[in-house]
């Protein structure tokens, strides 16, 4: 299967800056070029308890098939702002109404550098939280995902801690969510190291 | 005026670890010893708009007199957990009920190293958010503060951006709040640098 994805990625000097040129997405990690993505935590709060909508990637997806993923996530292509990309991905991937995605608060940025099977990844993930109504169910629309499951936040935390079911960077987005919502707190011995680790 | 503060600070190898020895608080930055503090964003949400309770430090306080401060903040002394310290400071400094402070979510940790007039500060700030009812008014109880003012979050952001009215590290706590609540978002050209800067 060709790794070619037919998605033009911009190469910039600064985040959101003018594109010097564009490059096929599959080639970005081959050159270690910084890439940007948007990741959305879709959550439900019932009786004070948090639950997260977790996606499973399609078994036929080119990258990380069958792994668990955030409710919505996507690479930032050439020509879209982070917000525009988020609104588009929310609708296309999960059937989340545009107005909801447009109002989802940005909650921070995660940065990392790491060697993956596809090459050197130097990524910035723009993170968003969206509280969803209890009756809403995301739907798999574009064939990139196989299923959505609503899981209690403690179960998601256990999967992140004890398994490798999540795509590597989605773990970070969830850990950031757990820190911002006080599920992981200063009682955790590695709290400071974890918080710093999300901005490497 | 003697800088002695009569507050014993623990010296540890890891955050929250066993104290190797304790040292007078005023001497901590003279040796560049890592210190820990708790900072609380006390906020009100009305009709979807956020406002922050901002404290002004007493003009007679030994350190940073008269400067603006977070709703509640304090150094973590020997023998208290971060949560115990938060609950104590909330009650003593601002008259915030213990049950509210006990339930305020931890939202992350800020780290920095910097040379200040008092010496080398290598600090970890444990941050908490507390949404307060619209009718509640914090009160200055222990003489460390002069006044509390409820300010629209945009006004607080402007003070942080344009002035030096806030004590240096309280600026960071507010910037972290602005990032987590989407007041500063990916449209800000320095967004990634700001996010990384809070975990140096």
Image (cartoon, coloured by chain):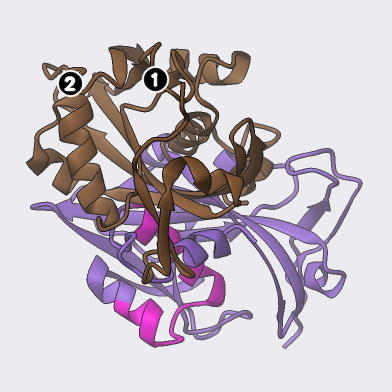
Chain colours: A brown, B purple
> Where does the image place residue A89, in percent across and percent down from the top left?
23, 37
| Image position of A48 (left or right of A182) | left
Q: Quadrant of residue A30?
A: top right
Please name whichever residue, A177 or B92, is drawn nearer the observer in this view of the structure: A177
Taking depth in this image into account, of B5 and A65 the one nearest to the observer is A65
The image's mark for residue A61 is 1
Crowd band around label 2 with a 10 angstrom C-alpha radius: few (<14), some (14–19), many (20+) = few
Q: Nearer the viewer, mark 2 or mark 1?
A: 1
Residue B53, placed above or below residue A65: below
**x and y percent of residue A68 in the render?**
43, 18
Q: Secondary structure at mark 2?
A: loop
Disc 2 to disc 1: CB gap under 8 Å: no
Q: Is residue B23 magenta?
A: no
Q: Same subunit under labels 2 and 1?
A: yes
The magenta span reads B158-180
Q: Secondary structure at mark 1?
A: loop
Q: State the residue at coordinates (59%, 34%).
A: A118
In the image, A181 versus A127, the foreground residue is A127
Residue that numbered label 2 is attached to? A141
Q: Position of residue A72 (x, y in %)?
A: 30, 31
- Give the spatial CA distance, label 2 vs label 1: 14 Å
Query: Residue placed at 44% from the left, 54% from the top?
Result: B40
Visible in this render: residue A185?
yes
Q: Residue furthest front?
A: A2
């Amino acid at each position: 299967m060709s790794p070619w994805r037919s998605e033009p990625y911009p190469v910039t000097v600064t985040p959101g800056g003018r594109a010097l040129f564009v490059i096929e997405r599959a080639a970005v990690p081959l050159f270690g070029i910084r890439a940007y993505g948007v990741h959305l935590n879709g959550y439900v709060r019932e009786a004070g308890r948090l639950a997260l909508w977790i996606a499973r990637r399609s078994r036929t997806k080119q990258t990380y098939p069958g792994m668990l993923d955030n409710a919505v996530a996507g690479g930032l292509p050439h020509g879209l702002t982070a917000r525009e990309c988020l609104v588009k991905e929310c609708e296309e991937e999960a059937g989340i109404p545009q107005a909801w995605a447009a109002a989802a608060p940005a909650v921070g940025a995660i940065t990392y550098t790491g060697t993956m099977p596809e090459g050197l990844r130097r990524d910035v993930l723009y993170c968003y939280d969206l509280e969803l109504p209890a009756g809403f169910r995301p739907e798999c629309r574009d064939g990139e995902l196989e299923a959505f499951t609503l899981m209690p936040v403690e179960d998601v935390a256990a999967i992140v801690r004890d398994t490798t079911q999540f795509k590597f960077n989605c773990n970070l987005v969830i850990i950031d969510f757990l820190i911002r919502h006080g599920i992981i707190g200063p009682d955790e011995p590695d709290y400071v190291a974890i918080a710093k680790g999300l901005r490497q």
